[in-house]
Image: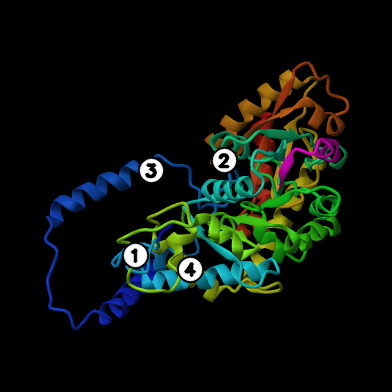
Amino acid sequence: MIDPTELELLKGALDTLAEGYADLPGFRTTFDADATANVLRQVATRMHDNYPYYHPQYAGQMLKPPHPVARIAYAMSLWVNPNNHALDGGRASSAMEKECIVDLGEMFGWDKPLGHLTGGGTMANLEALWVAGRLHPGKRILASTQSHYTHSRISDVLGLSFSAVPVTNDGRMDMDALEELLQNGDVGTVVATMGNTGLGAVDPLADIVRLQSDYDFRIHADAAYGGYFSLASTISEDTRDAYDSLVAVDSIVIDPHKHGLQPYGCGCVLFRDASVGQLYKHSSPFTYFSSAELHLGEISLECSRPGAAAVALWATQQLLPLKRGGEFAAMLDDSLHAARGLWGQLRNSANFLPLMEPELDIVVYAVDAADSATASARARALFKTAAERDLHLALIELPVELVRDYASAMNMNSETITCLRSVLMKPEHKDWLDRIVDILESSVAA
């Protein structure tokens, strides 16, 4: 789990960091090393009560281990502990954050967008919908029934009405249903989910963009989970059309702490039109005094934010540039291959009924049974049995209408069905598929 090389690299980075402050008079922080060591042992022991998120046999929720360069850069920066709210609190890390924003914007075809890092996707989506509400006051927010629940919650916080758009049986937003809602004339923003967290489905963004020419609404792309797959080379033609359409949307959210190899929390919000920055306008008599240059706190609803997140992301994007055909993109392709490989093996199983072919790296599958209630019970039992064998999965509750086409022989005697869900975020999953399937099959037999 712990590579000694990482500790050596951290020590080297800290030595280099110390050189920048060598001219200051020396002093040492006093603390009780023995008492500290005792507490740290307790902390490490308490941390045993976690799933092994870093291991390929963790194939449950969307938890991806940070890259070593991100861990080391983040830890090293804590000896300075910069705050990226104002340049007074984090000059170097603020500059790094601005460079990261340019690189992330270029990934979607944008030239120097307005944006900043956030604590996560929820805060990033809040800012995007806050801006949308200011520009289309009183108008409705639309997102699919498979979009993240945060959109309805945020709409409530902002005092905006929200409506959910049905999805087709592949988990994507239903365009006919969307247009019917748009015809009411009271919609201000449509949220396109670029990889929903339940099924990994990508909304048909190209079609949504075409509707924008007939109706007056903003498009916000929630790419918190799937945004980085715009760099992948093995996505389908329909999915590629959706990602290529991101250049036309008004705002984008992406979470580097998911596929961007970053520690939690590191989200990001981007705006194509930099003039929306005027909506953030405020004054502080004491915060922004060191420079006339833009302070990130002037374009953010959050105030204090960890500069360490920007340092880690900058280091990662230097080591693994956000380029199609590069090493980082190849890791995403490995995850796609892993998901399709698992889906293919489950199709040949007598015990499982895989649902829609994975669009990204999430595979959802039912346990075969005569009826949906029994299938749900078997899924919950298998979830526990597999965990006892060190294979960690996730459960998802779906409406039976979404599953019916994939389990036509199953009697649907319940409103929902519990299915299994595997997120194959780690490139290593590709080489562990046979072992994962072996444990699945033996667990369902038990």
Q: 10 Å neighbourhood of mark 3: few (<14), some, or many (≥20)?
A: few
Residue 186 on the magenta segment: yes
Type of amino acid under label 2: His
Q: Is residue 68 above or below residue 41?
A: below
Q: Which residue is mark 4?
A: 97
Earlier residue among tags 2 and 1: 1
**Helix, strand or loop at disc 2?**
loop
Tag of residue 48 = 3
Residue occupying image coordinates x 53% and y 52%: 55
Using the numbered discs, state the Cα–Cα distance from disc 2 to disc 1 in whole angstroms. Answer: 37 Å
Q: Position of residue 160 (x, y in %)?
A: 62, 36
Tag of residue 404 = none
Of the residues tagged 3 and 1, which is closer to the observer? 1
Q: Which residue is mark 2?
A: 392
Out of 143 and 338, give the one closest to the viewer.
143
Using the numbered discs, state the Cα–Cα distance from disc 3 to disc 4 in whole angstroms. Answer: 33 Å
> The N terminus lies in which quarter of the figure?
bottom left
Earlier residue among tags 3 and 1: 3
Q: 10 Å neighbourhood of mark 1: few (<14), some, or many (≥20)?
A: many
Residue occupying image coordinates x 54% and y 45%: 122
Q: State the image quarter where residue 412 is shown.
A: top right
Asked if the residue at tag 4 contacts the one at tag 1, i.e. Cβ–Cβ closer than 8 Å, the answer is: no
Q: 10 Å neighbourhood of mark 4: few (<14), some, or many (≥20)?
A: many
Asked if the residue at tag 4 contacts the one at tag 3, i.e. Cβ–Cβ closer than 8 Å, the answer is: no
Q: Position of residue 298 (x, y in %)?
A: 45, 61
Earlier residue among tags 3 and 4: 3
